[in-house]
Amino acid sequence: MSNKEKELHALFQAALAADWPSHLRTSASCRQCGEPLEAQYCEDRLYLVRCTKCGFVTLIKARKPLMAALGVRGWDLGG
Ligand SMILES: [Zn+2]
């Protein structure tokens, strides 16, 4: 793997392994397994959304954690 690939893989693993407080859990459920999605704010309206059950992790731009989680589900956020 290239350094960039290793870096991204490490980021992914760290995001999944991190202990997130329960309030980061949203009312949006994972499209793959139905578990509640968790959304952690990063910066500049960027959220890290994850599902610890099936190992789904993604970055998405949104105004609120719930909007980020819903965006992951493919909802139109209206800009
Ligand atoms: Zn899931």
Image (cartoon, rainbow, N blue to C red):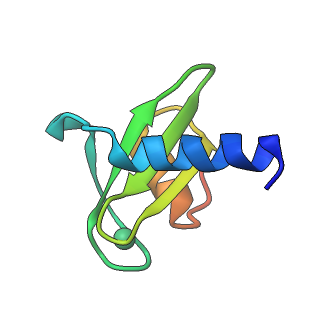
Q: Is residue 42 above or below residue 74?
A: above
Looking at the picture, tell me which residue is in the foreground, 3 or 38: 3
**Residue 44 at x, y = what percent?**
63, 20
Q: Is residue 74 above or below residue 42?
A: below
Q: Residue furthest front?
A: 1
Looking at the picture, tell me which residue is in the foreground, 8 or 32: 8
Q: Is residue 67 visible?
A: no
**Residue 1 at x, y = what percent?**
79, 56
**Residue 59 at x, y = what percent?**
59, 45
Q: Residue furthest bottom?
A: 32
Looking at the picture, tell me which residue is in the foreground, 34 or 79: 34
Residue at the spot 41% in from the left edge and 65% down from the top edge: 55
Residue at the spot 42% in from the left edge and 53% down from the top edge: 50
Q: Residue furthest left?
A: 22
**Residue 40 at x, y = what percent?**
40, 34
Residue at the spot 50% in from the left edge and 41% down from the top edge: 48
Q: Is residue 17 left or right of residue 12?
A: left
The quarter of the image holding the C terminus is top right
Residue at the spot 56% in from the left edge and 41% down from the top edge: 11
